[in-house]
Amino acid sequence: MQLPAAQVAVLEAASATDDRTVDAVASEVGESPTVVTRAAFELRDEGLLEVTEQVDESVSLTEEGETYREDGLPEVRLYRAAMDAGADEEAVEMGQLVGASGLAGPEVQIALSNFARKGYGHIDGGAVSADADAAPDTDEEATALDAIAAGDAETVDEDTLDALERRNLVVREERTVRSLLLTDAGVDAMMEGVNVAETVAQVTPELLTSGEWADVEFTEYNVEADAEAVTPARKHVLRQTADRVKDVLVGMGFQEMEGPHVDAEFWINDCLFMPQDHPARTHWDQFVLSNPSKMDDDDMPSELVDRVARAHREGVGEDGDGYHSPWTEDVARGLDLRGHTTSLSMRYLSGHAEGELEPPQRWFSVEKVYRNDTLDATHLLEFFQIEGWVMAEDLSVRDLMGTFTEFYEQFGITGIEFKPHYNPYTEPSFELFGRHPVTDELIEIGNSGIFRPEVLEPLGVDCEVMAWGLALERLAMLVTGAEDIRDLHGTLADLDFLRNAEVIY
Ligand code: PHE
C-alpha cells in the first residue's frame, strides 16, 4: 500500500506499541503534533487507525504563583514577621511589619486579605495580632504550589486548587489528548508492507512549467482537521447598533449634531429651565470639572444668557412666573461632563451652533454622556444617548409616539409603551418602555416630551419642538438579548458575548 510520507511515519510509530499519544508519536517521528494529528485523521478516514480522545486537565503556576512559591505567600511572610515582632503577645502596627516582611506594593493588601481568612490572626485598626498556634509550615496553598511545580497537581484537593485559581496563582487548562491505535485493517496493511507515495503539497512554478504537475499525486486537504480558534477583530456590538441608529435616523430625514463632552451648565441645565437649586444639579449627580472650571465668554452669548436668566426669575409670556429662586451666571458658567446630550439640542436650537434654523428641522446625535450613577445591571456611569428633536408647526404627542414607533420598528422592536413623566423642560413628557426579549420585563428605554415655552422662548424659537433622549445600550440589550448592561462595555464586558452576539437588523 502506498501512503503519503507523514501517514507512513505515523502508522509505523503507532504500530510500535499499541496505544500511543499524539505527542509521543510526534516526538518519535520528529514532526509537530499538528502534522501527526492531521495524518492520524487521514489514516482514520482510511480505516487504518482508531483515534481516541480524552480530555485532560493541566495545572500550572502563573508568574505570580511562581514568585510566591519561591519567596513565600505574602500572608505567611506577614505571619512570620508578626511572630518575630511578638504579635502573639501584643498587637504590632502593620507599618512596622511591612518593612520586616519585605512585602511590597499590592502584596501588602494580598497579605492582609488572606491573613485573617487563614486564621493566622486578626487585624484591628491597622494593628496585627498573630495566633501562636497557626501552622504556616503546613499552609495548604503553599504546599500545593510546590506540588504543582513538581508536576504533582493530582495530589492537590479541588478546594485548594479553586482558591489558588481565584488568587490567580495557577491556571487550569483543558487539553484533548489523542491516542492512536491501529485497526485490524491497519495491522494487515503493515504486515503487507506500506511505503511512501510521493505526494506534492505545494504547486511550484517548476512543476507547472515542466508539465510534471500532471503526473504527481497531490496531498489531500483535510478540511476536518482541528484548527486553532481565531477571534478576528469585529465591530463592537454597540458601535454596530450606533451605526445602524444613524442610518435609520438619516433615512428619516435627520441631520447629525455635534458638540463638546465638557460643557457649561448653561447649555446642560439652565437653557433647559432646570432651576439652579434642582437636586439633579448637585455634585451627587454630575461630574464637575475643577480645572478649567468656568466656560469662556465666546461660548455663552450674553443676550441669550440674559433671556435665560429672565425666564428663570420671571418666567415667559404675559402671565409667566419664574422660580423666584436665586440664579447666578457664575453657576451657569460651571463646567461639567454632560449628563445628557440635550446640551447639544440647546446649542443648535439657539442658533449658536449653525445659525438660525427655519422649521421644519430634524436633528439627532448618538453620543456619550456621563452620570454619577450607581453601577448596576441597567446603569453605567458613561453611556450613549440617542438625542433627537423635530421642530415644526403644530406638533402633537401623536407625532412623538409615531416617530418612536417608526424608529424602533427598524430594529424589530414593537409594542413600545409610554408612561407620563415629568421633566422641568418638557410638557407633556413621556418615558418609553420596551419588553426585554429574554426576561420579558419592561425596561425603560428613553425619555421624551415637547419643549416648554420657558425653554423655547429664550432660545428664540417660536414653533413647536418635540425631543427625546433614548438609551443606546438599552436598545442594544433589546436587540441582542443581553441581560446585563455591564456585559456590553466597561471593565466587566463579556468578551464571549461581544465576540459572538448577533446583531441582525
Ligand atoms: N434629557 C433627557 C434625559 O436625559 C431626555 C430628553 C431630551 C427628554 C429631550 C425630553 C426632551 O433623560
Image: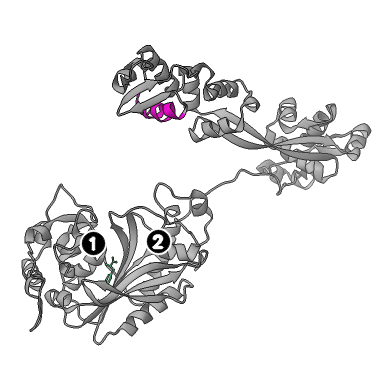
Mark 1 within 8 Å of ligand 1, using the beta carbon: no
Q: Residue at x 10, y 60 (%)?
A: 298
Figure quadrant, ligand 1: bottom left
In the figure, is residue 275 to the left or right of 381? Answer: left
Residue at which label 2 appears: 473
Q: Nearer the viewer, residue 210 or 437?
A: 437
Q: Which disc number belongs to residue 248?
A: none
Q: Residue at x 78, y 30 (%)?
A: 20
Dot 2 falls on a residue whose secondary structure is helix
Q: Are marks 1 and 2 in contact (CB under 8 Å)?
A: no
| Tag 2: amino acid | Glu
Quadrant the N terminus occupies: top right
Q: Image quarter for residue 448? A: bottom left
In the figure, is residue 86 to the left or right of 40? Answer: left
Q: Nearer the viewer, residue 350 or 256?
A: 350
Residue at which label 1 appears: 259
Q: Determine the residue located farthest toward the bottom in the rendered image.
A: 394
* Image x and y of residue 390, in percent: 28, 78
Residue 409 among those drawn in magenta: no
Q: Is residue 305 above or below residue 70?
A: below
Q: Is residue 234 above or below residue 462?
A: above
* Image x and y of residue 239, in percent: 41, 59
Point out the stretch of residues depicted in magenta: 104-117
* Image x and y of residue 334, in percent: 13, 56
**Real-space CA distance between mark 1 and mark 2, rounded to the nearest whole angstrom:** 21 Å
